[in-house]
Amino acid sequence: MTVTGWLTIVLFAVILTALAIPLGRYMAAVYTGERTILDPLFATPERLLYRILRVDPKREQDWKAYAKSVIIFSLAGWLLLYFILRTQTLWNWTGLNPEHFHSAPWNVTFNTTSSFLTNTNWQYYSGETTMSYFSQMAGLTVQNFLSAGVGIAVAVALIRGIITRSGTSLGNFWHDLIRTVLWVLTPIAFVVALVLVFQGASQNFSHYLNFNGPTGLANSIAMGPVASQEAIKELGTNGGGFMNVNSAHPFENPTGFTNFVEMMTVLIIPASLVFTYGKMAGNRRQGYAIYATMMVMFLGAASVAYIAEAHGSPAQHAAGLHTQVIAGTTGGNMEGKEQRFGIAGSALFDVVTTVTSCGAVNSAIESYTGIGGAVPMANLSASEVIFGGVGTGLYSILLYVLLAVFIGGLMVGRTPEYLGKKIEGREIKLVALGLLITPLTALFSTALATASASGRASISAAAAGQPQGFSETFYAYLSQANNNGSAFAGYTGFIQPNAGSLGSHGITFADLLGGFTMLFARYAPILFALAVAGALAGKRVSPAGLGTMRTDNPTFVVLLIGVIILVGALTFFPALLLGPIVQGLTGHLY
Amino acid sequence: MKRDIVTSAIGIVVLTLMLGILYPLVITGISQVAFPGNANGQQVDVNGKLVGSKLIGQNFATQVYKNGKPEMKNGEPVTNPDPKYFQSRPSATVPPNNGAASTFSNLGPNSTATEEEISSNIQAYLALEKPYNPGLTAAKVPVDAANTSASGLDPDISVANADIQAHRVAAVRHLPLTTVMALVSKYTGGRGLGFSGESGVNVLELNLALDRMTGAH
């Protein structure tokens, strides 16, 4: 460990907070229709879009109407994306398939389509050997924007449900979606993409480069419009890499500086939305309490990961390697890490992208030490509420807040209420279902894949029959159920002997189980969150009295952290023990 | 219901045109005008011929010939590290440093396969460097020289790694060690913003600078 490493983590948290407070305020203005500085730029396109889409943005939707719009729009997106990916060669006339890659098989495409629709970006395929530039742009980039937009819209709807004082309206889905795309996602992605190119990332439509290096060896380099996708991939907490190795690829993430920018881009919206919530609720302290909860858990995870990775792995020590920091080296577990990021830049990136639903990686998580690998799993076990995905993080932690209020109420014998609204049987049932569905899906799919021979076919040869093999499987379904997308990448659902998908085949079991896991664990919680919003929207607000439990003080923060850890630990601890913790507690090699 | 279907159908097409075509085109247009070098992958030419990208690590090795024919193993050329060049980090791609198919090693922390891989990397490193660094032992091999990079294309090596290799390169090229060391520090990049990430030495740039100096190539 180094002072600079710790400094990176601390400065990251400070700068994030400093940026998130103003952006949170700006986003509140976007959703409440107040004036913002970007109005002159986007007011006209907004009106035009409403006209083309035949939307009346003022039409109020109750939770059912809102949910219906979400589902139908997602279905339309799914169909178009599947079509684009399966007809890759049809689009060769655009010139955006310079390597003439064929489409991936149906099962892999089912998985990929479901993955990008659900903001998961789990990737069984490898970008530079499978996807044409056209598929990456018109297919994947689009859903990078839209799946993020849908997530934020649902979070805004839940906020409205909690704060509204009359009626059943949660706002209008199309209004929220379009304003998110125009006012939030596009301008930030635009700036970040150009910063990335400025700092060295690629952005072109060229053929792959073919050349002979200085020693005469032939080599080839994959190209493409990387930066434009990289920016929204991080901003929308999507995480699907343009290239196979994701943000470890020098064209996606060329320097230590871009690494910092990308981490910031991942967390900026989830962090800001918490302040947006405080502002919209007219009670900023509520936002601060949730932010404090998230930040404490985030810093804890980052510290554990950094310490574990800086220590090095049993395999390194067995091979006689010294892993302490000596002048001019990074020390630590450098297996599957890039020199320019080092240990701290890799461990922090890993935590940033697994507390959120991003799932981008700049290092190989499978090669992390036992404890270092347990950190992302623990983050996923907390159901993406430590900042979480764009939108999904806020609506999930609000469900946890309601649960904590309920449990706190039971403990002190008071009627549980939140922001003046009574939390009753119906709400708490919906909250419990909304929170449990993701862990249950993850565990069910893991069990099915572990117990069946078709499931075990996906485990990498080196890990078969070992705790690492279980970790791979568990991580795969934990990640897909939480719509994260990071992976112990040895686990595979796509056998591709050559670039371009000719002669390749998918592993149907892993592709379909994963695809359905992602779809179910995305849309079921969305429906429950909207149902909770609907149930709360109709409630009368009673003034806070002496008996009201406060939800904006340190006591509540501690209670909330306790509830999150308790639910996560109760559901996942046995599984975590079987895989990463066993490995972390032993120096034994398998 | 019907209204939602119509809006969704039009919406997904219009948004695809906006976000999937217009947005990447605009970014590409601006990038190609403002930062053409970066946008096109930081290509490096020698005498007008492309020899690689500054950002993509290469395998500085030469083809092994057997009976006058290039020796192949499992369809890939067999190579030996070229001692007059600084060597990149170990790579898991096939063949090593394949810029068109990046991949992780995915070797687990407690796996014997990982231990074997690291041991063989250490042995290869010692075989190449120990003749020029008599005091070098496994314990002194920098971690980045023994562990596979993430991308398989890491353009950098650590400063400690470069310092060890400098002894070999200086001896093979008949250059004073101080000259080679000066080049190493010239191509050592700092941390982002002074704190983010780690400094590293760009291997391709360093090797090409050496070629320019000694006229080899």
Image (cartoon, rainbow, N blue to C red):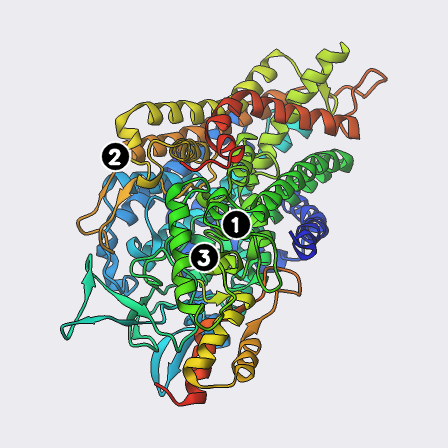
Query: What's the amino acid at mark 3?
Result: Ala
> What residue is disc 3 on?
B146
Residue pictured at 70% horizontal, 47% vertical: A25
Which residue is most to the right?
A546
Instruction: Tell me what residue is drawn at x 19 percent, y 59 percent.
Output: B75
Question: Could you tell me residue A581's position as x and y percent?
Answer: 52, 31
Q: Is residue A555 left or right of residue B19?
A: right
The answer to whether one can see residue A207 in this image is no
Label 3: which secondary element: helix
Which residue is the extreme one toward the top?
A413
Q: Which chain is disc 2 placed on?
A: A
- Reply above or below: A115 against A382: below
**Residue picked out by circle 1:** A333
Task: Identify the chain of the residue marked 1, using the numbered disc in the image.
Answer: A
Residue B112 to residue B90: above or below: above
Left or right position of B31 against A514? right
Disc 3: host chain = B
Quadrant holding the N terminus of chain B: top left
Marks 3, 2: nearer the viewer: 3
Q: Position of residue B211 (x, y in %)?
A: 41, 84
Say which residue label 2 marks: A508
Please name the amino acid that badge 2 sits on. Answer: Thr
